[in-house]
Image: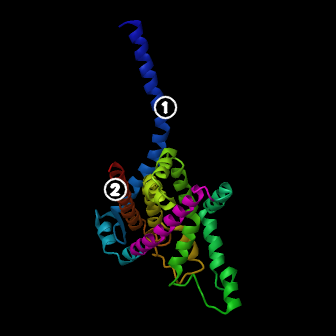
Amino acid sequence: MSSGQLTRRRGSLRSRWTGFGFVVPFAVLFVLTIILPVAYAIYLSLFQDKIIGGNAFVGFANYAAVLTDGQFWSGLLRVFIFMLVQVPIMLGLGLVMALALDSGRLRWTGFFRVLLFLPYAVPGVVTVLIWGFIYGPRFGLVGTINSTFGSGFEPLSPHWILTAIGNITVWQWVGYNMLIFYSALKTVPTELYEAAAIDGAGTYRTILSVKLPALRGALVITTMFSFIGSIQMFNEPNLLRTIAPNAISSAYTPNLYAYNLAFIGGQYNYSATIAIVMGVLTAVAAYYFQVRGMRKEIR
């Protein structure tokens, strides 16, 4: 082997080990924080704590119990209804805001961009506590309005609690989605706008024919993230439950149900089963959105 070939081989080996050096830290963290917890949850889901016999292997009996659990399906249906209503409103508002900022007719766009994004910078727990105080029928803004006008509006009542949670979520996340849409609009080539203007396209035709097609990838991503966030809803009902116990049950959402089963009821095996089922549903839905979005982009 010549000296040149030996040098190239050493350089190739050095580059390969350099690549491993970048990958290994991530791989270790991924295994420790994702793979091992999921594997342990799957292990727990295959056992049951019994009065006689202790922790016994039961196979897929826990999964069969989840499929016939009325509380689980009731919480999942509630989350699904929440997603169908809240996600389009949140994404629609974010889209309108992004189009307004990108229109060029709005002054101080930097100020409004920061102002609209600011709620996302507030921690989720703090956001729920702020709105919980606002919603209070005997204190805060709603309580003041009720005492002033003699009304009896209660956002934390069983009839309005899901709407109240949706309002909190929209307030916190609409700015985040707006920023994604706005960033996508900034990548649209100016040649497309010039061609549309030459063809005589007005403002609305430019939005429909140029801007919205350019936002297709961003819409897929935000829809997928919004779905995952909705199906994992936990902070809002868990924190509001302390001031609205009659409106939010311990199984209000699947995640809240699993949490209460594990840390209040001590049913770790069944709780792990619910977590695995929800993880599978979330992964399937995310894969569906991603594949569907890629097919549309290819077309």
Earlier in the chain: of badge 2 and badge 1, it is 1
Which mark is drawn over residue 284?
A: none
Which color scheme did the rendering employ for the protein?
rainbow
Question: Which corner quadrant holds the N terminus?
Answer: top left
Compared to residue 29, the image places residue 259 above or below, namely: below
Residue name at image x 50 percent, y 59 percent: 202
Q: Type of residue at label 1?
A: Gly
Residue name at image x 37 percent, y 57 percent: 289
Q: Type of residue at label 2?
A: Arg
Give the distance between the C-alpha atoms of the residues marked 2 and 1, in whole angstroms: 35 Å
Which mark is drawn over residue 21?
A: 1
Compared to residue 224, the image places residue 251 above or below, namely: below
Question: Where in the figure is residue 154, as x and y percent of width and height?
Answer: 59, 85
Residue 52 position by quadrant: bottom left
Question: Where in the figure is residue 113, as x and y percent of width and height?
Answer: 63, 57
Compared to residue 241, the image places residue 4 above or below, namely: above
* Name of the residue lying farthest toward the bottom: 150
Residue 238 vs residue 275: left or right? right
Q: Nearer the viewer, residue 72 or 80?
A: 80
* Name of the residue lying farthest toward the top: 2
- Local packing at callout 2 (Cα closer than 10 Å; few below 14, some 14-19, many 20+) is few
Count of marks overlaid on the render: 2
* Magenta extent: 76-105
Tag 2 near tag 1, CB within 8 Å: no
Residue name at image x 48 percent, y 50 percent: 198
Residue 102 inside the magenta-drawn segment: yes
Q: Secondary structure at mark 1?
A: helix
Residue on which the image places disc 2: 292
Q: Is residue 55 visible?
A: no
Question: Where in the figure is residue 218, as x and y percent of width and height?
Answer: 46, 54
